[in-house]
Amino acid sequence: METGVASYAKGVLPRGISSRRATAPGHALPLLRLNGALCLRSSSLFGESLKVSSSISSSRAVKAAGGSSPVTRCELGDSLEEFLSKATPDKGLIRLLVCMGEALRTISFKVRTASCGGTACVNTFGDEQLAVDLLADKLLFEALRYSHFCNYACSEEEPELQDMEGPAEGGFSVAFDPLDGSSIVDTNFTVGTIFGVWPGKALTGVTGRDQVAAAMGIYGPRTTYIIALKDCPGTHEFLLLDDGKWQHVKDTTSIGEGKMFSPGNLRATTDNPEYAKLIDYYVREKYTLRYTGGMVPDVNQIIVKEKGIFTNVTSPTAKAKLRLLFEVAPLGFLVEKAGGHSSDGKQSVLDKVITTLDERTQVAYGSKNEIIRFEETMYGSSRLKAETAVGAAA
């Protein structure tokens, strides 16, 4: 790891959660310290002023959880550790998510200071890969190993299972895209990290619905950490403050209707007439175009704005690029926990069985009516069909 960057600070983990062994030099995870001092100072803009009750009421929380889970009352202004201690009793999962948060914090710093004048190498799939991708990949693997609760991990850049030396019983397996949108780092667009957490030791033969947690880190004007847990209502946003701490600033439990669209893979409209028809509908109905070219910010805006539709559709000449394990399933989990829906055209992406690490698919995320419109326009019917048809007009 790079010199001049300190390893984990003491006291970063929640009370009652301890490491099984001392930090080995090879497992040290850098924080935002340079020359032994924090780069940033505590901010007065945020802090105790955000310590207010969450907008999740008891009734909404029970509804979002399907009535099967106890209500978790979270507080806006909580630290990441405080939130997680309320959201789940699983100390192993808490530790893993805190360790990943440390990696995201460091990646954010490195993205802001990265030199992106050229391409460093080419990954297994032939995609261009900038040097900062390699650093992000390394940091995330180190974080998972340091957590001591990860059995196996696999990244989009290294699509083979890596033994993370997890516990003999229990533990988790994690799949991640270390830096989604790395090809637009040099243009200073927002990029992000995506990861999904599955129980046990398998990342194939499972579905996205089997995840116990999913998250993304967004590196833009602000750095945020978006988390969803299986047994906790809603999807939750944490802001990286100047002192390096994560603070809970927003929760999302419903995705409403709104005319905002993010159309990916538009080249598919040349030989996929149904997709062309759908795009024509958005334009004709005067939807607002909000497309960055990065999947993380485009999906994140649906959660933050609580409306909209993201599509990435295939065609005979424009094949699927998005990977079910590393991108589509974790983001589907976040969107659906936020109260939205996902679809591959016929079913929720969370119901697709992951058969291979490199499996790819088309996808749409959005509100219920937008997903109905997507499925009806693309395939003539929708599993979510409402009483009033909302399909794109002919």
Image (spheres, grey):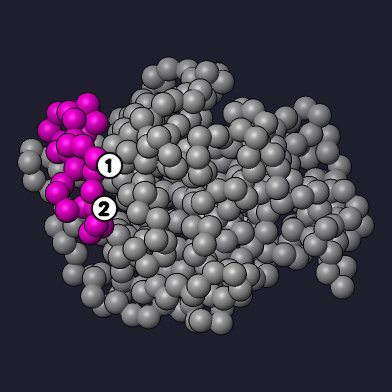
Task: Give the answer, above or below, for where 115 lies relative to 254.
Answer: above
Q: Callout 1: few (<14), some (14-19), or many (20+) C-alpha neighbours within 10 Å?
A: many
Q: Is residue 394 left or right of residue 70?
A: right
Tell me which residue sits at (32%, 38%) in the image. 148
Task: Give the answer, above or below, for where 384 lies relative to 269.
Answer: below
Location of residue 389 by image quarter: bottom right
Please check the rendered image and state whether residue 229 is part of the magenta-colored stretch, yes or no: no
- Location of the C terminus (image quadrant): bottom right
Check disc 2 and report its element: helix, strand or loop.
Answer: loop
Residue bearing the label numbered 2: 17
Kind of residue at badge 2? Ile
Tell me which residue sits at (32%, 60%) in the image. 80
Q: Residue furthest front?
A: 169
Q: Position of residue 125 (x, y in %)?
A: 56, 20
Observer able to see residue 191: no
Observer able to see residue 287: yes
Q: Residue furthest left?
A: 36
Q: Position of residue 283 (x, y in %)?
A: 74, 57
Tell me which residue sits at (44%, 42%) in the image. 170
Mark 2 to mark 1: distance in Å?
22 Å
Q: Nearer the viewer, mark 2 or mark 1?
A: 2
Task: Give the answer, above or below, for where 241 lies relative to 122.
Answer: below
**Badge number at residue 106:** 1
Task: Give the answer, above or below, for where 153 lies relative to 48.
Answer: above
Please check the rendered image and state whether residue 8 is part of the magenta-colored stretch, yes or no: yes
- Location of the N terminus (image quadrant): top left
Check disc 1 and report its element: helix, strand or loop.
Answer: helix
Q: Position of residue 321 (x, y in %)?
A: 64, 32
Magenta span: 1-28
| Predominant secondary structure, magenta span | loop
